[in-house]
Each structure stands twice: as C-alpha cells, then as structure tokens.
Amino acid sequence: MSKTDNPPVIPRNFLISFILVTSLFSLWGFANDVTNPLVAVFKDVFVITNAQSTWVQMAFYGGYATMALPAAIFIRRFSYKSGIIVGLSLYAIGALLSIPAAAGANFNLFIIALYILTFGLAFLETTANPYILSMGPPETATRRLNLAQAFNPLGSLTGMFIAGTVILSAIQVEDFKNDVNGYAGDLATTAIVQQEHNIPAFLQAKPRERVHDANVQAYVAMVGVDAPATALQDFKDGKITSFQGMTHRELQQNDLKLVALPYTAIGCVVLVVLVVFFVTKLPHTGAPDSDHDVHFGRTVKRLLTNPNYVGGVIAQTFYVGAQIMTWTFIIQYAENELGIDKATAQNFNIMAMVIFLCSRFICTFFLKYIAPSKLLLILSAGAIAFTLGAIYIHSLTGLYSLVLISACMSLMFPTIYGLALDGVGQDAKLGSAGLIFAIVGGVFMTRFQGQILDMDGFMGTTATRGSFFLVVLCFIIIAIYGYTVSRAGKKAEIAA
C-alpha cells in the first residue's frame, strides 16, 4: 500500500511543531479546571448566592465569546504564531492579576482577571485547533485534532489536583462551616459519610483537625442555628467577632491568597512557554491571508449557509454548557445531596477527569472503525442515560452516575469541531472562531443552573438534582446533530 493510500496522522516535518502546539491544550485545560471549583469557594468566601457565584464561569467563558472573532481576524491578517504569542501574553496577565485581587479581597477584580485570562485562551484555542488541522493531510485532520485534544485532560487533571490540595483542603471557611455543624469538624463528618455512603478509601480526603472555636460555639448555643450559610452571613455582619483569632476579612484574605497561588504559578509557567514560542520557528501552513478584507464577507456568508457548520456551532454551544455544568456542580451535588465536604467532593471531580482522559484515547481508537458522527450519537445517548441516573438515583450511586457522564463527553468537543469544519477549506480560520465563540454556552447554562440551585425544588425533585435536566437537554441537541450529520453522510454515499 502506498503512502498516499495511508496518509500519516502527523507528517514527520510537522512533528516538533505539533508537540509544541499540543502543549497549549494542556495549558488551557489547567485554567479550565483550576477555575471550576471557585464557583463553590467564592460562594462561601464572599458569602454570595449560587447565582452570583456563577459570575466566575460567566466571566471565564464570556472572555471566549468576546475575543473569538477578533482572534480569528488577527490570525487571518498575521499568522498562527502571532496568535499564539498574543494568547500566551493575555493568559499570563490575567493569571497574575489574581495577586492584587486576593490582596484586596476583591471579587470584581477576580472576575476581571478571569475575563482577561480567557481572552488569551480564546486566542490560543482559535489558533491552535485549526493550526493542528492544517498540519498534515485533510484525510487525517479529525484524528490529528482528537490526538492533540487528548492531552487537554492532562492539564485539567493537574488543575483539579492543585485545586483540591492547595485550595479546597486548606481554606479556613471550610473549618468554620465544619465547626458550625457540630464542633466535630471533618473527623466526625468524614466518619459519618464513610459509614452512610461507603466512600472508598482512595476517595477520602484527609480529615481536618477539630476546631472547637469558642466564639462559634457561643453563637450556635445562643442562636440555635446549625446552617453554615446563615452563620457565614452573621460572621460577615460581625455577629461572630472572630474565628481562630481571625476576623471575617482576615479569613477572606487568607483563603483568597490560597486561590491566587496556582494562578501565580501558572502565570510564570506561561511566560516561560511564551519565550519558547517566540524564539521557535513554526511552519507556514497557509496563514495569513493578504486579501482577508476582500473575502471576509464572502467567507461569513459561505459559513452561515453551510448547515453542517451552523449545526456544529449550535451543538458545540450546548456541549460546552453540558460539560461546564457537569464539572462545576459535582461539588454542590456531593455537598447538598450526600453531605460530603468540598475537598472529598473534588476527588470525584478528579475521578471524572481520569475517566474523561482514558475514554478520550479509547474513543480516538474507535474512530478508526466508527464514523465520527455515529460515535457522537452513541456517546450522546450514553450521556443522557447517565445524567438521568444522577437525577433519579439516590445515594452514592447517583454521584457515580454523574461522574460517568465524563466518559461520554470525552470526544464530543473535538468531534463536533472536526465535523463542523469538514470541507470548509481555508474558511476554517474564520470558522474556528464560531466554534470557539460557542463556548459562550458555558456562560448562560451555568447561570441558569445556579438560579435553579437557589430554588427549594425543581421538576419534582430537589433543586440540585433537578438542575441537571438542563444537561439532559444539551445532550439531546448534540444527539440530534450527530444523527443529522450521520444521515447526511449516508445519503452522500448512496449518491456517490
């Protein structure tokens, strides 16, 4: 068999460039998953509602929506390398802005920092995805992108691990909540949860020491309240004067310094990567377009009249919404439904990402034998089943069902991306912007879910469980896209 009959996934002349650009997938994976737990952390640290805490995700994914199109226009005018350099610069600036935000205990500045950080991520994703697609034969483009995307969860896992060990297991607000819940801290809480829900030993967080703060005990004895949210508000209002010798403001600043620590570290790492890309010569694969102004309007028109592309943007919007809702609110599900503390709940998030990573490599292998659209349809059906399990199955089994959704989500983003850009040729540079703009789904969906979580109940069940009906809706829409593309492919085969 000749080489033309079996084209390589990564041609030898692109190998080094492929490795460098693929490293970017891990960088934005880290940012995504070190940020997700902040929704739960900021709710307690700043004493705000679930809906207000989703401003974290609205800023994070709103940055993608704001910068996706400008990034696409930029790389059309200049080059993929220029897009990467700008993206890394904005990433570093946003990450390092967390330092003054933590020092001033300023929620709004944290939101601005995340917004700027994701300007950089928008540049990186808008650049890296089509660049990877262009690094070789069109026949292997989807497989090449899936391979690069498979390294995204490595960054995500690192972000989750650091969020769990540096932030969730060390923040003082959790000690305060545990003390309010009965003076026993996590030693008693963890023992009860282990006994009632049989949590495996490898998932158990290290118990905190007993706190027994006198001010908190006096408050609970006088007020007769054991709700941490109520006590946190009273602590903020000064009805509890101190906790472990700290005022509420001092506790905030202590916890927010822990939040800023991983962002400071990744900001420094990104600066190093920026220097590497700046001094490395990357191959030219067709960008920039010197006549971009002439063809911009025509390109947009072609894309908007391409039902496969438009459907892909819609499907991607709902996929990102489903992914962010699932991973963001695993912690709230474990806390609200099973009484599991944040640090232990984060272990389930890590488990979900390990499954996601393994499933991505497995599904990439299956793409040799199953058409991408058909695999997307199968994965969507599985995701719907697991989400319904999380809603209707109680005890730890429901939480495991929520975790297993990640196995089905593993290949959805790159598969939708590849299907939507199939056959668009040079229009992929601008077309990628629409697919990155689709990340705006994470803005609205998490906000809606946060509002549902603040209710007393939803759709005949608890607010926490009922909020996942939004996730079911997302996977139904993705399944429809997979079915539509698969059916169109069969018609094309018959016509041929």
Image (spheres, grey):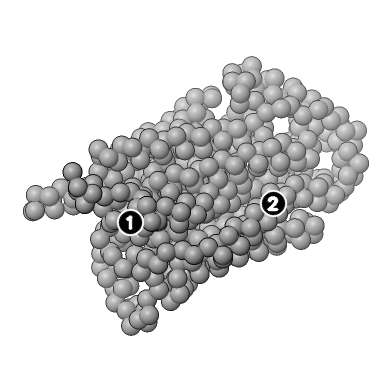
In the image, residue 64 sits, relative to residue 150, either above or below, namely below
What residue is disc 2 on? 265
Classify mark 2: helix, strand or loop: helix
Q: In the rendered image, which quarter contains the N terminus? A: top left
Kind of residue at badge 1: Gly
User: 149 or 102, which is in the foreground?
Assistant: 149
Type of amino acid at the residue the image marks with label 2: Ala
Q: Residue at x 88, y 38 (%)?
A: 244
Q: Where's residue 402, x and y in %? A: 48, 34
Q: Nearer the viewer, residue 384 or 367?
A: 367
Q: Image point 49% across, 65% down: which residue?
A: 281
Crowding near the residue tagged with mark 1, few <14, some 14–19, many ≥20 C-alpha atoms within 10 Å? many
Quarter of the image for residue 219 reads top right
Distance CA(mark 2)–CA(mark 1): 34 Å
Q: Is residue 479 left or right of residue 409?
A: left
- x and y percentages locating residue 112 in the rendered image: 65, 63
Left or right: 397 in relation to 95: left
Residue 355 visible in the current orientation: yes
SS under mark 1: loop
Question: Mark number for residue 376?
Answer: none
Image coords of residue 157 (percent x, y): 56, 40
Residue 39 pos. (x, y %): 62, 48
**Residue carrying label 1:** 136
Q: Is residue 313 visible?
A: no
Position above or below: 184 against 227: above
Is 82 or 391 nearer to us in this picture?
82
**Residue drawn at 74 percent across, 26 percent down:** 207
Number of on-image labels: 2
